[in-house]
């Protein structure tokens, strides 16, 4: 089992469940597809990458190459969630409003034709900074919990000494 991978997946799943739980509590309309929806609070992207980076940092050290790679991946993902994907969602909202405007114009001018799209564009694509921060905080918690609950191999004094002084095999 790859604990780092599972830690990240649990971070993502926890964030998605937190997004859906208010809908269930308030008995709003929701479907199982809401568990896969993007956007909203907390960011599951941030929760996934931060839980991965924090677990790796705690397990292998914050100076390790693995932590550096996971952290850089996390920064890119979170920047993308707040930047490009957030603005793409804003544009999708404008396009959806434009669809309604065109429908009204066609209704007022019957000599023009416009085929209405059956499905509007998805508007919840990215995150506001507070949503990314919430996901990052959740990710830190999940990464820490995964590390502290991980079973440890207990070595006796001789095992510790051998481990400390043994040379790594090529």
Image (cartoon, grey):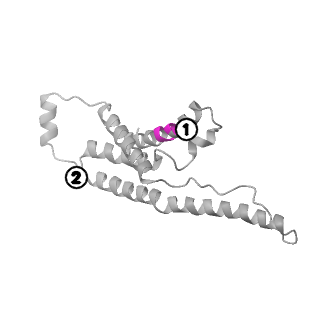
**Disc nearest the viewer among 2 and 1:** 1
Quadrant of the drawing holding the N terminus = top left
* Residue at horizontal 14 percent and vertical 40 percent from the top: 164
Q: Quadrant of residue 149?
A: top left
Is 166 displayed left or right of 121 in the figure? left
Q: Nearer the viewer, residue 118 or 51?
A: 118
| Residue 144: assigned label | none
3D distance between C-alphas at marks 2 and 1: 37 Å
* Residue at horizontal 42 percent and vertical 43 percent from the top: 8
Say few, some or many: other residues with alpha carbon within 10 Å of mark 1 (under 14 / 14 to 19 / 20 or more).
many
Q: Where residue 110 appears, x then y in whole percent?
A: 87, 68
* Residue at horizontal 55 percent and vertical 38 percent from the top: 20
* Residue at horizontal 62 percent and vertical 55 percent from the top: 122
Is 54 displayed left or right of 41 in the figure? left
Q: What is the chief secondary structure element of the magenta stretch?
A: helix
Q: Where residue 120 appears, x then y in whole percent?
A: 69, 56
In magenta, the rendered stretch is: 14-18
Q: Nearer the viewer, residue 85 or 165?
A: 85
Question: Is residue 16 shown in magenta?
Answer: yes
Is 81 displayed left or right of 97 in the figure? left
Residue that mark 1 sits on = 20
Q: Where residue 62 appears, x then y in whole percent?
A: 24, 49
- In the picture shown, does residue 96 fall above or below 28? below
Residue that mark 2 sits on = 63
- In the picture shown, does residue 84 fall above or below 50? below
- In the picture shown, does residue 163 fall above or below 90? above
Q: Quadrant of residue 71?
A: bottom left
Per the image, label 2 sits on a secondary structure element best described as loop
């Amino acid at each position: 089992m790859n604990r780092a991978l599972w830690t990240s997946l649990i971070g993502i799943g926890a964030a998605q469940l937190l997004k859906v739980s208010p809908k269930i509590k308030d008995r709003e309309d929701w479907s199982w597809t809401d568990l896969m929806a993007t956007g909203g609070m907390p960011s599951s992207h941030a929760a996934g990458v931060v839980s991965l980076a924090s677990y790796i940092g705690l397990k292998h050290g914050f100076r390790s190459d693995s932590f550096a790679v996971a952290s850089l991946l996390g920064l890119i993902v979170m920047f993308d969630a707040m930047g490009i994907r957030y603005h793409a969602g804003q544009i999708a909202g404008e396009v959806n409003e434009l669809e309604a405007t065109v429908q009204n114009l066609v209704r007022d001018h019957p000599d023009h034709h416009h085929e209405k799209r059956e499905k509007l564009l998805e508007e919840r694509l990215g995150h506001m900074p507070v949503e990314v921060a919430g996901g990052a905080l959740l990710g830190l918690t999940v990464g820490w919990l995964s590390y502290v609950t991980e079973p440890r191999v207990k070595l006796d004094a001789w095992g510790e000494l051998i481990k400390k002084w043994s040379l790594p095999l090529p």
